[in-house]
Image (cartoon, grey):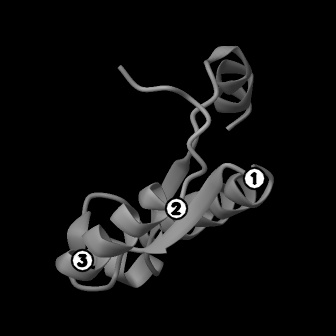
Amino acid sequence: MSLARIFFRFLPKPDLIIFLDAAPEVLLERKQEVPLEALHRSRTRYLELCSQNIRCTVVDASAPLATVIAEVEKRIANLPHKREHD
């Protein structure tokens, strides 16, 4: 995570960061090669990182796919448009 924070400082800042979150047990069903404890640790760290960044929003990825997509689209649509698009 330290390396990620250092690397993140040098990247252009996105308008929005979407963290697709789910309980570690749900994630384990989808990603069985990662131990449950590692999923707990990673999720905690990502939620902490997200809470420290005003551009970050958390979306419940345990919901049905159509619901997740609709929520992500809503969050993108609600962004204040500061830039002119070509």
Q: Nearer the viewer, mark 3 or mark 1?
A: 1
Residue at 34%, 82% in the rendered image = 62
Displayed quadrant of residue 65: bottom left
Residue 3 placement (x, y as % from top left): 68, 25
Residue at 34%, 72% in the rendered image = 27
- Tell me the crowding category of disc 1: few under 14, some 14 to 19, or many 20 or more residues within 10 angstroms, Cα based: few
Using the numbered discs, state the Cα–Cα distance from disc 3 to disc 1 in whole angstroms. Answer: 30 Å
Using the numbered discs, state the Cα–Cα distance from disc 1 to disc 2 in whole angstroms. Answer: 14 Å
- Tell me the crowding category of disc 3: few under 14, some 14 to 19, or many 20 or more residues within 10 angstroms, Cα based: few
Q: Which residue is mark 2?
A: 78
Residue at 56%, 42% in the rendered image = 81
Q: Earlier in the sequence, mark 3 or mark 1?
A: 3
Displayed quadrant of residue 7: top right
Q: Which residue is mark 1?
A: 54
- Tell me the crowding category of disc 2: few under 14, some 14 to 19, or many 20 or more residues within 10 angstroms, Cα based: few
Residue 15 visible in the snapshot: yes
Callout 2: SS: loop
Q: Which residue is mark 3?
A: 29
Residue type for callout 1 = Ile
Residue type for callout 3 = Glu
